[in-house]
Amino acid sequence: MRLTCPVCGDRDRREFTYLGHETYLHRPPAGAPAEAWDAYLHLRDNPAGLTRELWHHGSGCGAWLLVERDTVTHDILSVRLAREDTA
Amino acid sequence: MRIDDKGLIDRGRPLRFTFDGKPIQAFHGDTVASALLANGIRLMGRSFKYHRPRGPLTADSAEPNALVTVHRGPRAIPNTRATVQEVFDGLTVRSQNAWPSLRYDVMQANDLLAPFLGAGFYYKTFMWPKAAWEKLYEPVIRRAAGLGALPGGADPWQQEKAFAQCDVLVVGGGPAGLMAACTAVEAGADVILADESDRLGGRLLTEDTQIDGHAGYAWAEAMAAELQAKGVRILTRTTVTGAYDGGTYGALERVSHHVADPHPDLPRDCFWRIAARRCVLAAGALERPIAFPMNDRPGVMLASAVRAYLHRWGVAPGQRIAVFTTCDDGHRTATDLSAAGVEVAAVIDPRADAPPGAIRGEVVSTQGRLGLTGITIRSDGGLRQVACDALAVSGGWNPTVHLTCHMGARPTWDATLATFVPTADAVPGMSVAGAAAGVFTTSGALETGRDIAKAALAALGGRRVRIHIPTADETPPRQIAPLAVEAPDTARHRAWLDFQNDVTVKDVRQAAKENFISVEHMKRYTTQGMATDQGKNSNVGALAVLADATGRGIHQTGVTTFRPPFVPVPIGAMGAGGTGAGFAPERRITADQPMRDRGAPMIETGLWYRPGWFPKAGEDWLAACTREAAMVRRSVGVADVSTLGKIDIQGPDAAKLLDFVYTNTFSTLREGRVRYGLMLREDGHVMDDGTTARLGPKHYVMTTTTAAAGQVMTHLEFVTQCLHPEWDVAILSTTEAWAQVSVAGPKARDLVQSVVAEPVTAETFPFMACGTVTILGVPGRLFRISFSGEHAYEVAVPSRYGAALWQDLVARAEDMDGGPYGMEALNVLRIEKGFVTHAEITGRVTAFDIGMDRMISAKKDCIGKDASRRPALLTDREEMVGLRATDGGSLTAGAHLFGLTTPLRPESDQGYVTSACHSPTLGRSIGLGFLRNGRARLGERLRMVDHLRDQRCEVEVTAPVHVDPDGGRARD
Amino acid sequence: MTDLTAHDPAEDLLPLHHGDVRLSTYRPEAITSLMPLRGAAIAIPDPGRAEAMLGGLLLWSGRNQGMLLGPPPANLDKVAMTDQSDAWTILRLEGPGVDQVLSRLTPLDLNPAIFKPGRTARSLLGHMNALFHRRDAEIFDIWVFRSMAGSAIHDIERAMRGLAARQTL
């Protein structure tokens, strides 16, 4: 498997670690109800198809990345910095 | 027998090797199989289950029968294909799976038991009495079956693995592959061409094809030179074994299998991981046998193999050879043999429009126990016997589709070609040319090789090129669907499908009768297709039998899943370099050598190596550890703490980051001060703890535990990049830049002052102060913090001075009735003080559990705060307590806690011990652990039970801090 | 003048060579990490690039991060700096077989047309995090963490030996 890091280019999967779903980017505000935290921490869909997930280029530039991937075909549709508004 | 003037072997380089101790003459270029056949030896092995005599079926890596062991002793390699192993002078070859000899194998008696050893026999027989299976039947059956044996012991061979990248990977160096590589390199692409054999040419080496009027192999040789000159990376002796996601391919290169005395550093194999933007699969096709009764005798081989032995190795596998074919292509065998002066005994073709000169019929039996002596033919004229010592069989051709199916696709049945062809777009980026695509002529291979490469390059945007196709002439061969010859169903008429696993047509029919009608079930029930040839010689034939037995078409019956690897890959090659010191990086502290010189055992802590203890003469670990811990509390000890993570945090928003990741407040920390911090995961459980020092207005250094350094760094990067990208802060690991040494004990200040230029006093360095100082002339840092509970400091210098600093401090300490201490003593000291490590904060533990919930500030948010307040995490918890042995026994980490008189059952389990040690200060065994509602149970007596080590003792529940509960010693 | 002796992890192990490839250590005067904060007057080179600046050579080494080879600069406003001189061991691998040796150790594309001289990359060397700097067609500087220098030298040497042995084929 390979990922094209927007900073470093096309790289072998060995350089990356997977965190989990894009949901992790959207932390509930302080004091949010238990259901919101439960959803953030524990509840996930498991689609056969497109998913958006977070990877860390830990053995490369260190960037956190948002990857669009098809869980059935394994196609990688896009790889972006997790927060495009970061420098 | 050897045929003069034929073959690509080098008759100017004769060689000798041994087979079962017997010397055999060969030539450079021979394989073990070709050389044995040249010397009239057809019997090369015994089959797995029935121990039937077997000879080579093929001339390539799909070989199911001729498996031998090469080399001797610890270097022996079993299950080597005699058809692939190149001969070198002095090679030792032994047959397998026969005792006492290949000719007289005792286990051939199994063959008589065949009626009891059919498909799924182990579900139906050898079942009574029940105990006999494990003690009698299984051991005997295991010894009776099997292929080669491993020599045992560590693998003495070097192995290698490598990475490569290219624009176009061409798999197969036959006519299609050569044209594809040529086209691609002309268009400016970076090309890798891999071929399984020791030279390029593919089937041009094994047939008498002409290209542009020249011998096919000569054309291939010239092409190879041209491609090399143009910069194509050519990997010979390399099988591409698998297709994986993202255009990644695995390939096994046989680096030194053919070398007599390999250099000790020379790897045996190299496993390549190739990233290719495009792949052209030109892997050719594999001929399929015909399933007819008694089709497995030595001397029965594929027609293309007979031609390969003839054209490539100059060997006729017999003196009177018959041909049985359902395919136009098979007839070439008779033509080629006659042209070479070899007698053709008969040509048998069951098709209605068989060419003239052929007998229209089928072979229904064979004779010859240790090698073919004759065949029985059934035709319109009835049954007749023909004497022959070899039979060339062709049941048609199967395109080598395997790589196209490695990512879940199935091939498509082509009824016209009567074979499976690749399904389009089965693997992203891969296209197929030549026989692998069902194009069975040489001219077709040349043309599709070029055209497919061009199409692949169009996607890459290469130069436009014009490539000329050389001429090669044949008519497309016509073949029929796989044939299984019908014959009376008795033990004397078994028709083999899977030669290696001894699976017959009868077995497949039986599976169908027992309702294992799914092809995946039939495979597992009969074990057809599960041998090391992975069904290359039997899948399609078995499928045809199953289809017939269940009244379906071949297409409806389907195929099983194809998986990598295409040929067996040694695990040592995939994991090359991963044994011994190469298994994992070893992280060494700067004082590593001086510590070893003092006899300290260096203990693994993750990837780091840290000193366990510093034994004096006659001390075991416990004596050294106890002495060191007492020494620290009595005078002074020196311990390396360089391995703890250090993260440099700078910027206007540094304090915001700290306030967010720590439960307690750091924005109130003054310059020149250090504070202990607790870090939670977002689910409210403790992630790590440590101290953070403020070195400047916007400059902090965070320390983490050794084990969690990487995890915390990743966490901080997630916070700053993903959760708060608006913060202006920079973080960088500085763990490696600094060597850090702890100096602890009542004399610590004196020791530290003796190496620090600046005054170290209660005023300049009160408890939890920090600052930059000069240490023995070197700019460094000083932190007054304590993990031992004693008056203590951590002294930091740039790593290049780490070894020298440690040695200097140890020497000074020894002059003060102190000395070095290691991890064991460090652990004793912190257990005495009730300080947690990852033995306690295991990932299932909260701040509340360890009694630190008041460290979660009410005034600010932090990671994990909300989730930590879930009611279930705040009531009826296992809370951290101290434990002390009351009966002279020893606590052990991992032991569980029970009431004194309650039964030892899971329901009465009250908690568990996390850390344990002998306390020199208290003169008894103590520990820390988690006890249900523990904080309300101080003073209670419990039983500690270690079921694993079978150890027990009585313990008293105490507060976690065993020594100096007010903490005055650190603050003095 | 210091009383303490300096050591480096490669001092007893290098230089060494096998075949026509040589492994040695490169010891720069100093290494300083630079991470610009908002409003800083300097910028890190683009990913994979190295630029002469601040009296030395500044290598891109990660997100918003550069490693300066050369004398440590005076404090730069709004730039987070740390002294990294002792954090790294820089292994210099040179010779015609450099790319072949490194291909045994890293999944990076080493094709000189792609990894051009003067460029840098962060990737793996075996299981270790490393910074690669191609000095020239046949010279690579490989930066590894000091604590892992021994392991890096072990792995690189093993690859060098394997390739040198192929000359005997």
Image (tube, rainbow, N blue to C red):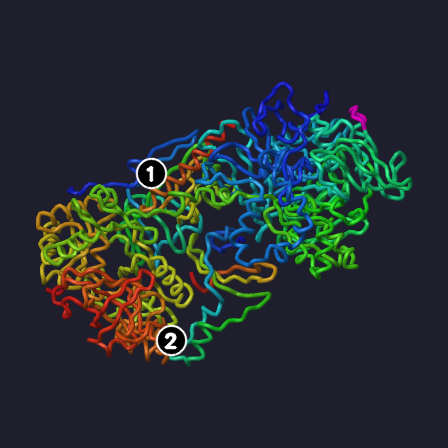
- The answer to whether residue B690 of the structure is visible from this angle is no
Task: Describe residue B972's horizontal placement relative to residue B883 as left or right.
Answer: left
Residues B37 and A20: in front is: B37
**What percent of the width, then of the height, locates residue C67?**
35, 48
Q: Amino acid at mark 1?
A: Tyr
Task: Describe residue B474's horizontal placement relative to residue B869 as left or right.
Answer: right
Label 1 secondary element: strand
**What percent of the width, then of the height, locates residue C10?**
31, 39
The quarter of the picture where residue B377 lies is: top right
Question: Dot 1: within a 10 Å radius of its alpha carbon, few (fewer than 14), some, or many (20 or more) residues?
Answer: some
- The answer to whether residue B467 of the structure is visible from this angle is yes
Q: Amino acid at mark 2?
A: Ala
Q: According to the image, label 1 marks what residue?
A: C26
**Chain letter of the residue carrying label 1:** C
Q: According to the image, label 2 marks what residue?
A: B867
Which residues lie in the magenta part? Answer: B338-343
The quarter of the rendered structure image containing the N terminus of chain B is top right
**Chain letter of the residue carrying label 2:** B
Q: Is residue B341 magenta?
A: yes
Q: Is the residue under label 2 in contact with that under label 1 (CB below 8 Å)?
A: no
Residues B331 and C28: in front is: B331
The quarter of the rendered structure image containing the C terminus of chain B is bottom left
